Image (cartoon, rainbow, N blue to C red):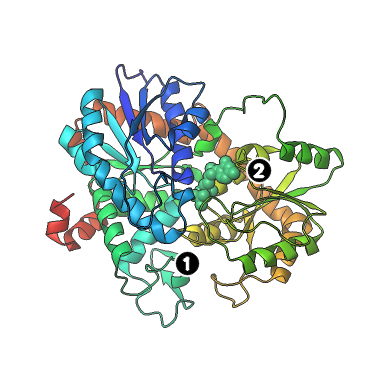
Amino acid sequence: MAPISGAHFIIFPFMSQGHTIPLLYLGRLLRQRSIAVTIFTTAGNSPLIRAILQDTDIKLVELLFPKEIDSVPPGVENTDKLPSMASFLPFAIATKNMQHDFEEAIQNLQPVSCLISDMFFGWTQQSAAKFGIPRLVFSGMGIFSTTMCQILSIDRPHAGTVSPDSPFFIPDFPQLKLTRNDFDPPFCDIEPTGVWVDFMVEQVLAMAKSHGLVVNSFYELESSYVDYWNHKIGPKAWCVGPLCLAKPPSIAAVEKPLYMKWLDGKSAKGVPVLFVSFGTQAEISEEQLHEIAKGLEKSQVSFLWVLRSKGVEYLQGVENRGLIVKEWVDQMEILQHKAVKGFLSHCGWNSVMESLSANVPILTFPMMAEQHLNARLVAEEIGVGLRIIPSNGSVRGFVAAEEVEKMVKELMEGVKCKAVQRKVEDIRDTACAATEEGGSSWRTLNFLIDDVCRKRLSQSYSRSPKNEEFLGRQDLRSINSI
Ligand code: UDP
């Protein structure tokens, strides 16, 4: 396929690490194909972005982050610095105030071939339409969870359930059994209402009007859900991942971080290590953290725990076999270290992609957002991990130390671990093949570039029946405002 001369993509990631990092890797992949790339961010977020992109000529445009947002402390420009998740929605809604500056900047950057912006920036659909630029939406989620969330809101297969733990089936996927507790409040309610619902409806409407979705996954991993989405829901999903495989090797630091030296020591002695991390957003009670620590300690397994929870300075009893790290780490590099043989993870989608790409099985401990659906996919659908079950038997609830201990041992040395390890190896190989020249993600990215750059925008909108039905059901006033 001939390179597109003069193509220029602008990328606007949401200010959360899990939404920003994969889009920076996508920027690299575009740049490797001679596409000019400009990334939009804010002053508070640009240092990390500049560090990750230091070896590229990708341009950065800094917009002013809105001031005086209710419950967001001054100076906070990333959701990982929010005092609690209760501030997430005011933070996300306030980004609408960036629209004027955003559009002024686009005006100065013309010609622009395509806008890739976060799902939470539904308002950018209006900006893209003003300039006649196709918008691709990035949500940070895989296509299985995206599809399940849409099926829940359109087909309502959960409508007859009596309790949040009652199983229900998805008619088009009879092998799947979900519960309302697999979805975050308020979406687990049969008739969800409130500000979160209003906000998400706005984002989904904007997505339905967009040119497509760019997805950090690969076709072979979620093929039946990709096909279903593209035929029955839409707009078209383009799987171009795992994007973490576009991460270049770390630039050798003068001195290795302590945690990498610690891992070197473990591998020199042939000691397998469990990596433990619950991402950048999850709020975990102190009681739950202590229970996890107790379980890890009793498991007798060596572990490296990246603990970003605020206010927990000391955890009893974990110093002997474990290393607790409080700083920002290179998670991908840790997962790729030969000592690391398992990952106790909250199942943020990037962590899932990174773990599978590094050939590391996952012990799932989902907490929020779409992580429960990711955990189902990992443990039940694909078989690349095992699942920790809360004491109440639901998918949500307090997890006892004994369960942590039992499942950590099972993942690291139990009878089931061999089959899981074999499956992970298969998936890792498929993921690598997908991103290599000629692979499914490699080709999809080329098709996507060709599609947005060569086709006339008016010809390339594709609406599917469910998408139309969803749009049709919404209040006309809110549609017109997007
Ligand atoms: N991450 C990292 N170092 C850290 C903490 C997180 O590199 O110390 C990265 C991690 O590799 C992943 C992202 O931050 O790319 C977190 O995204 P994920 O979807 O796993 O979880 P979230 O934080 O969004 O819940």
* Sequence-first disc among 2 and 1: 1
Q: Nearer the viewer, residue 316 or 31?
A: 316
Q: Is mark 1 within 8 Å of ligand 1?
A: no
Q: Secondary structure at mark 2?
A: loop
Could you say where residue 329 lies in the image, as x and y percent from the top left? 62, 40
Q: Is residue 426 above or below residue 319?
A: above
Could you say where residue 348 lies in the image, as x and y percent from the top left? 52, 52
- Distance between mark 2 and mark 1 Cα atoms: 26 Å
Count of labels in the image: 2
Q: Is residue 105 above or below residue 423?
A: above
Q: Residues within 10 Å of mark 2 (few under 14, many from 20)?
A: many
Could you say where residue 166 lies in the image, as x and y percent from the top left? 47, 78
* Horizontal relation, residue 248 to residue 466: left or right: right
Could you say where residue 37 lies in the image, as x and y percent from the top left? 37, 25
Q: Residues within 10 Å of mark 1 (few under 14, many from 20)?
A: many
Which mark is on residue 182?
1
Q: Which residue is mark 2?
A: 359
